[in-house]
Amino acid sequence: MLIKKKSLSHLILSLLFLTVLPSSLCAESFRVRKTAVLSLESIRNQDGTIDTNASSTVNAGINDAIFIKLPEDLTFIQGIELNIKIPSIVTKCPNTIIYSIYENVSPFPSEKTIDYTGKELYTSVYPGLVSLTIQIPLIRGNTIQKTPYADKTLIPEHSRNFVFIRNQLAMKGVPQEINSAQFVITAKPILINKDRLVIRTKNKPSDLTVIVDDKQVELDKNNSCYLKPGVRNVTISAASARTENRSCIIEVGKNSFLDIDFQSTAPQVFISMPQGTHVTVDNQAADVKNGTLSLAPGEHTLKFSLGGYEIVKQLTIIEGRNYSVDVKLDADVIEN
């Protein structure tokens, strides 16, 4: 009985989906010809930003595994994109080669390992095209979209910082040349369309409020939040600190830092006085640092003493205001 090519393709796909479901429930043991290593561990610059042009390329054939090493820090990364050049012999025999993503792989993959166990998560076929794009999401809530030109997979478990892919035949009776065919696989990170704003301070108020472009945002435990690229106006306020208004430029794949030295809202009295002047506030010695004195709101009596001279002033302190005091201890000279 003759089977038409189109019907054969449909039959293969149907069989694949029927066999993937049971295998996804438990681990299986398998052997590969070799394990090709694709490393994305060095995609970050020295300052911690991501090199948006970074990629890694490797060759892999039928019955080979591709071991993709992920960077330890996945900040700004929502997935991995694989651009695969399909050998011409495979394009002439579409839907005869499948690729599968595995998770819970054991032992830890290496170039020298050929025997593995793992749970099959996702399977699809190589089409009769000269190239294929596979997008592997790594986080929930990602913005990766499946298109006619790119295959989006399920999210693999990657707590050990790698993704594992296996190539294999979907059927027998393929041309012998397919066994020596080589796929050229290039991997690069898919970045989130956001940057991280980090607020650096030594004296963060407990009631800190951050407003970005008139919208309140929440800071994480690292005093950071993610923002879309562009120029952003940031207002930082707290009941116990003076409001800070800043402007910053947000770029994809980079950390933007705002260094804030929060100033207390407690009223400040700036005092200019001769060197050696002794100051008391409400009959208590006052500690004037760098010509500045902090006073609580209310009525206060300030006394300035130098030698035999004294000046006493009454001062009403109001919350949120600052005051300046210019002390001059003069002496009248009379000629006889």
Image: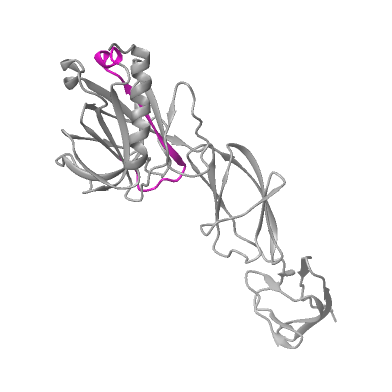
Of 276 and 99, the residue lying toward us: 99
Place of residue 150 in the rendered image (x, y in percent of width and height, measured from the top left): 44, 25
Q: Nearer the viewer, residue 252 or 99?
A: 99
Above or below, 322 against 251 in this view is: below
**Residue 206 makes an appearance in the image:** yes
Q: Quadrant of residue 322?
A: bottom right
Give how far across and how far down residue 181 sits, in percent.
Answer: 20, 20
Relative to 171, 78 lies left or right: right
Residue occupying image coordinates x 37% and y 14%: 6
In this rendering, position of residue 329 left or right of residue 198:
right
Tell me what residue is drawn at x 44 percent, y 34 percent.
190
Q: Position of residue 174 (x, y in %)?
A: 21, 17
Q: Quadrant of the C terminus?
A: bottom right
- Which color scheme is applied? one colour
> Residue lying furthest bottom in this view?
283
Q: Is residue 89 magenta?
A: yes
Q: Tag count in the figure?
A: 0
**Where does the image place residue 58, in percent across and percent down from the top left?**
25, 29
Q: Quadrant of the N terminus?
A: top left
- Residue at left 37%, top 16%? 7
Could you tell whether 220 is left or right of 190 in the image? right
User: Magenta residues?
Assistant: 69-93
290, 252: nearer the viewer? 252
Tell me if residue 40 can be seen: no
Measured along the vertical axis of the image, is residue 31 above or below residue 1? below
List the single residue furthest toward the front.
Answer: 1
